[in-house]
Amino acid sequence: MTKIVGHRGARNIWPENSLTGFRNVLALDVDAVEFDVHLTHAGELVVIHDATLDRTTEKTGLVRSLTPDARIATRLEGSSDTVPTLAEVLSVLAKNDSKQLHVEIKSDEAKQPYPGITKKVVAEIERFGLAERCHLTSFDVSVLEECRRVAPHIARLVSVNAEWAAKQGGLQAFLENVESLVDIVAIEHELMSAEWEHITQMLPLDRLGVWTLNDEALIRPWLERKIGFLTSDRPDLALRLSREIQSQTQPA
């Protein structure tokens, strides 16, 4: 059965990567929660998607320039929440031991990995006793190679879209390169559709994820294909459709 992943918590329901969103998504029957981690100059691991504050907060500027006091004073757009630390997020998510965590290690505004971020993320995951529940994720193969060196016992997931695959020498070369590096390959849905037969010849369904699907017309076909993982900003909708499909396929 397809596992449903709440994207940035569940960003079409609650503010993305917010403590409010993470608390609320735990009440849903999702299989996993996905979120993003950056590293500031002050050494804080903070949970936010972009390398800048502009899109998702009421402030502007670089995430890495945030001081602890500035972070606490930076509210998420349309919310009373502030930018959370990784420790704050893990503290919330650790309370429900049925959820897997997809922890994306982000790069800076120049698309360069933050020096030392992997070791710091792994240390926090270990501190909360969550290694067995986590996948460390990235688009960047070098980051995932570092994850394997630092924490070979923590599962890994790579994300890819058409643009990124082209930069890596094409989809086939990319998949061959990551096949032994990661447990899951998460592919943008348009690329997955276009290359479905080729992809499924190389990898089994339980190692494949598709992203990011937010309406019934997109979600239902992938559930019917029994893809391993489906990432959505509307995990509530994906869960409802999954239940409907299951009920339709059960014998009377």
Image (tube, helix red, strand yellow):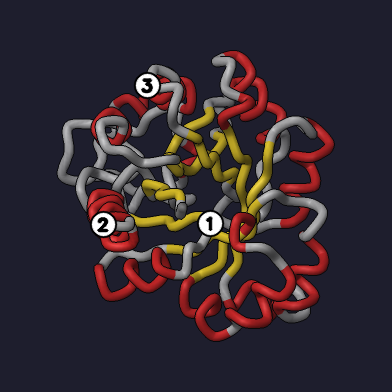
Task: Decide which of 198, 58 is in the foreground and name it.
Answer: 198
Can you say whether 39 is above or below 231 in the image? Answer: above
- In this rendering, position of residue 17 left or right of residue 66: left
Residue identifier under label 1: 228
Dot 2: element: loop
- The Cα atoms of the two marked residues, 1 and 2, are separated by 26 Å
Using the rendered image of the protein, determine whether residue 62 is visible from the camera's viewpoint.
Answer: yes
Can you say whether 114 is above or below 204 in the image? Answer: above
- In this rendering, position of residue 241 left or right of residue 71: left
Dot 3: element: helix
Q: Which residue is drawn at 46% across and 46% down?
A: 62
- In this rendering, position of residue 106 left or right of residue 9: right
Residue identifier under label 2: 252
Amino acid at circle 1: Gly
Kindly indicate the quadrant of the structure image that contains residue 92.
Answer: top left
Q: Are marks 1 and 2 in contact (CB under 8 Å)?
A: no
Q: Which residue is drawn at 53% across and 56% down?
A: 228
Q: Do the residues labelled 3 and 2 touch (CB within 8 Å)?
A: no
Give the x, y percent position of residue 204: 66, 63
Task: Decide which of 103, 219 is in the foreground and name it.
Answer: 219
Give the x, y percent position of residue 168: 75, 73
Q: Which mark lies nearer to you, 3 or 2?
A: 2
Q: Which mark lies nearer to you, 1 or 3?
A: 1
Q: Which mark lies nearer to you, 1 or 2?
A: 2
Residue identifier under label 3: 92
Amino acid at circle 3: Val
- Extreme-bottom residue of the structure: 194
Crowdedness of circle 3 by 10 Å Cα count: few (<14), some, many (20+)? some
Mark sitting earlier along the chain (1/3): 3
Question: Any mark on residue 202, and which?
Answer: none
Crowdedness of circle 2 by 10 Å Cα count: few (<14), some, many (20+)? few
